[in-house]
Structures are given as C-alpha cells and as structure tokens.
Amino acid sequence: MNCPGNIFARQLYDQAGNKTDTVTHPNTETILQMVSLHITENAPSSFNSYSAIMLRRFRIKTNLSPETGQLVIDSTESTISQNNAEYLYSTETLIANKQLKPGFNQSENLSVKVTGKDEGIYAKLAGNLNELSILQPVINIFNKSYLSPFSEAAFPYYDYSSNDSVTASGDSLYLVTFHPNRDKNFDGFSGTASIDAKKMTIRQISALSVRKNRQEPLLVINESFEQLNGRWLPSERRIKVFINITYNNQDNNLIAESITNIYQQLINPPLSPEDFKNSMLQQFADSVTIADNQDRQTKVIRMMAEGKVSLGYFNLDYNKIFGYNLFEGIKLGLGGETNRLLSRHFTVGGYISYGLKDKTLRHGEWINIYPSGRSNLRINLSYKDMNLEFGGPEFLETTSLLNPESYRNLLIKNMFSTKRYSTGLEFRPSNELDIYLFGDLSENRSRQNTSFLLLHPFIPISLTRTGLQLRFSPGIKLKMEDGRLDEVTAPKADYFITIIQGLTILSGEYRYTKLELKGKFDFPFTGIGTTTLVVRGGTMTQNAPIIELFNGYGSSAGTFSLEAPYSFATMQLNEFAAANYSAVHLRHNFSTWLFPDKFKTRPAFIFAQNIGIGQLNNQYLAQYNLLDYRKGFYESGFEVNNLLRMNYLSWGVGIYYRYGPYQFSSIHENFAYKFGFFFKL
C-alpha cells in the first residue's frame, strides 16, 4: 500500500471520535478505516426517521463512431442530454421517500414519464443502476461482482495514495487515489475520493471500472455528498455504462446513463406510523417490482413447459426423467444439456431412458456449436437412439405444454426404432425467419408388438437423407435469457416448410423427395369471436418407405381421450396413410364475443371443423396393406374449455362427430369424447 508520510499540523478526530490538537497526517489506510466508521452513521437508513424527494433519470442510446462503427468510450463526467429523441428508451421519476424506525418505509411516485419501447431489459437495467453505489461493499451487475475500494475487505487488494488540498472556502481535504493491485486478479475500480479532513466523511467520489478486455462493460460512477445538520448525506449519483448486449438476437453497443438527485432531505423529521399509507401512487411504484417478478415467473414456467429446469450452468430435461406415450408407456431416465451460461460457443447434452412398456433402453448425445457466440448461428452434431411415429411431421417447432397441439405426442400408439446420426446448420437471417439445413444416416427397425405393426411389418431400412426446414413467424419477439433464446411474444402467424431428399449413397436404400408445409393464422371474423385456421399439406414421390408416408394425423386413442387441437379427433392412430394430402383445421372461439371484458376468465365455447383428403398410389395401398382417404374425411366438434382455472392451468371437455364417406356404420362409434388441459401465461 502506497502511503505518503508528509507531516503537517491539523485538527482532526481520532478513531474514537475524540478531538486532538496537533497531530501528524495519518497514513491512507488510517484515513480509509476512519471513513468506513462514518459511512454507516451518515447513511439515511441509520436515522430514526428520514424524508427526501428523489429525482431519478435513466436513458439508453447507441453511440457508434460514424467512421469506425465502434462504440465511442468517453469516461468523462457529462450532463445527460435532455433531448429524448436521441434515446432508445428513457424514464424520469419523481419519488417522495420517507422512513421511520422500526420498519416503516414508503416510496411514492409523484410523477412518472417514460418514452421509447422496452420489453423489460431496459427497465431492469434502470432498476439496477438506480440502486448502485460505490459505497456498497460488493457491486453486483452484469453477472460480475466488483469489490468496492471502500470495503474493509478491499485493503489488501487495492493500492492507495493520498495528499492534501484546501478548497476555496478553506476546508481541508484528503484526496485519496485508488486502483487495483497488479498482483491481485479481481474486478474493481480506479479513481479518486475527496475526504473531509475534519469529519472524516466522503464529499465526492469518481470511479472507473477496470476492464480486462474490450468486451466487458465499462462503468463510470460519480457520487457527491452534501452537508446537512453536521452530516454528509448523498446528494447526487451519476452513472454511465458502456455495454455490448445481445438483444433481439443482435449485438447492440449501448450507453446507459443514470442520474439520481436527492432534494429536501430531512434528518429525524416528526413522523408517526399514521404518516405511512398505501396510496394508488405507491401501488404504481410497486408495479415495476411486480412486473419484474412476473417476468421471472413467466420465464420459469416457459422453460418448465418445454421440459427444462435450469440448474446453474445445466438445463435438466424432466421429460427424460419421466415421460409417457401409449407405445412406450412410462419412460424413466435422465437427460439435459449445458446452457450458454457455461459457454457462449457450445452446449453439450445427452439422455438415457427406459420405456416400461417398450422394455428398451435408449440413449443419445449431441453438441451444439455457436461459432460467433450468438444464437443466430448454430452447428449441431448428434446421435440418437429413439422411437419415432410412422409418418410423423418434421417441422421446425418446439414441443411445449404451452402448445396443446403437442399433446398428441402422448397418444402415439405405433412407433419404429431408429438409430440416427445427424448434422445440421441453423441460422436466423432475421427474428422472423429460422432456417435449418440437415443431413442424417439412420437404421430403422420395427417391433411387432401392436396390431398395426403386426399387420404392417417391414425389414430393416437404411436411410440417407438431407433436408431443409423453414419457419417464418411474423410478429414474433425473442429475448436472450440466461444464455437461451426465448420466445417472449407469440407470432401473429406461423408458417413451416420441410423438404427432405432421400439418397442412395452411404448405404441409403431409397431415393425420394418429400415436401410438407403448415400454416397457422387468425382469420378475421368480425363481431362474433375469433377464428384460428391451420392449413396442412404434403406431397412425396411414390417410392418412399412406409415409415416416411404421411399419416392422417389422427388423435383418437379410444372413445374417451386427450384433446389435441388441430388434429382429427375421431380418426384413429395410423388409420390412414397418404403420399399426397391436404387438411384444414378451423377453430372458432365465441368467448371474445360473449365475454368481451373477461373472456380470459370465462368458459371458452369453441366450434371446430376438420376436413382432410389424402391419396396413395393403388400399387402401394396393396403393397403396404394401407388405406388412404381420397374421398375426404370430415368431422365437427364442440368444446367448452377454461371450465376450471388454476393460475396458469385450465381444464375443458369436448365432443366430436365423424361423418362422410368414412363414417362408421354404428352411430356411437362416430363420436369421440375429449378432455383437455391447457397452459396459458
């Protein structure tokens, strides 16, 4: 520790607070130790009562050099421009604070002004900066912990020096300079502090975080204090942050500026418990905290709906711990994947599972590589030993409990075993467009343990495939959270295209082309509710193997079964097959018409109409012992959902009737009764 030993005559207080007459200039460590004793007693929280008016301003903007396109770093203290047009987002809040021991606190928003657009990340940063002070022992921000030079634990980690000065008013000051010790590896600050020599209290601090590389955030902190009734209280805090963040799947070079000014401070004003009340303004002030808590809760629920539970650097997949479908029965095992908190450039995952009904052990391993460290470019390498449905769709969509269409996976009765080696490249030219190029080699076998599999046996099939998957989602909004890209706003529509080419190389036995598409969008229907339409279709060359033929997308596993929207509720699993098909699934919700104000908490009355047509060449109908539905398949249904709602979960029931060329001779066989559960955020 660098401590000059110049000697001078001065009045000051010793460590016990006793006044002495003529003493030597204390060394820097002694100055800081004495200052630390007074930090707590000068904090507003130490007073019996306290009140103040606080003005908080926050603004965030880009600041790139027009010549280089790089972030311009200016660590000098400057006044925030009042021209809000320069900023992406800005807030200005006037707050009345008061406190009374023991435990009476109230912060009341007197005025709030917000400009610009935000999805939570800017407001969260504003909240963090508002509470930040260099006097905190440890400053936690941006997943980093900075050790304050004014913490008692900091003395071995910093180099300090001090000298003397006199202000224009004749006040004597110690000017303390600090910077991290070169022999210590930690996150800290360099800067100066002005110390009142008589009171041993801080009057002003200027600090700059020490960066190890240009990718780290840079913090500039300036704090000022004012004298009131013999105390030195915080009066102004200016914070400037230079940061590069990934937002909306793009790197953004930003400058965040925060100023807090404190006015009309009163030490020990005459307050009583009756002076503290819950006002509408206070409720509004609490709304930011409530919104942040809801955002965190929503994020957890969204991950769990996808089967993920975050455990630090690892996301556990509880679907691999406990899963279920009608073919495999209950599945027990373990699975998960490292997340991008461990590394921005790769994730590694795997699973092992055992089906109690299938009586087979399955496993898989994979690695995802992100060359740029960003989620808009991913390379995938994997091996998976798994069961797949005959003719199941292969769209670029995520299975989630938030999407009830995926409940059909629980009803699958007929599956084949595949051992598949895959490689793929996924990239996002924009938030709305997701593209995945892939290739795979697989060995496929079937077990004759269901009626369908007994009637449709096949010898082992070797496939070599390459393909392209597209998803176009206009209106979707994405946000990076804990190293993963989350869908925070549902798209206005969703369009999927999958193209697969079978090859006769690398032991591949079939050469064929397969195209399948799907579109989901709301159809405008004025006055009587909302209509959602799903259109599906596919075509392939006729020489494809049986496992690749389209199934009819039925979801009838019995007279009573689980509801799976946008499927054929009365069509049995693998009842039909096709090489060319098209289908329309329409659902009209009358709730927005019947209950316009409270439709989210009222029963949902839904009419459903499903129509499909599928054709397979007569030669293959006989060869594979299959049926197609070239004459058209028709069914109608009615559901009452949202009958019982518990937080994010609701329940419903429905009834469907099958008619047309493929209806059964017995009337009761044409009915299907459904029960369902739905997760909504």
Image: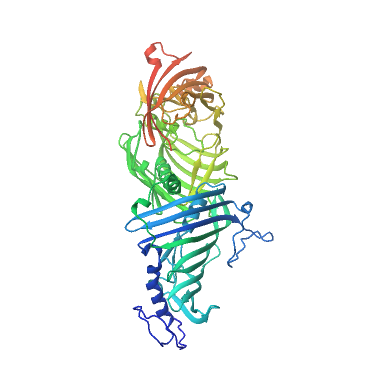
Which one is nearer the viewer's eye here, 117 or 329? 117
- When the figure is inspected, residue 106 is found, relative to residue 235, above or below; the finding is above
Q: Residue furthest front?
A: 270
Q: What quarter of the picture does the N terminus occupy?
A: bottom left
Which one is nearer the viewer's eye here, 180 or 272? 272
Which one is nearer the viewer's eye here, 348 or 146? 146
Q: Position of residue 127 (x, y in %)?
A: 47, 54
**Residue 479 appears left or right of 68:** left
| Residue 83 visible, this angle | yes
- When the figure is inspected, residue 184 is found, relative to residue 469, above or below; the finding is below
Which one is nearer the viewer's eye here, 371 or 154? 154
**Residue 71 appears left or right of 52:** right
Q: Position of residue 512 (x, y in %)?
A: 56, 32
State how the image is colored.
Answer: rainbow
Which image quadrant is residue 67 in? bottom right
Which image quadrant is residue 43 in? bottom left
- When the figure is inspected, residue 525 is found, relative to residue 58, above or below; the finding is above
Which image quadrant is residue 563 in? top left
**Residue 456 appears left or right of 359:** right
Q: Position of residue 679 (x, y in %)?
A: 41, 35
Q: What quarter of the picture does the C terminus occupy?
A: top left
| Residue 155 visible, this angle | no
Q: Position of residue 578 (x, y in %)?
A: 51, 24
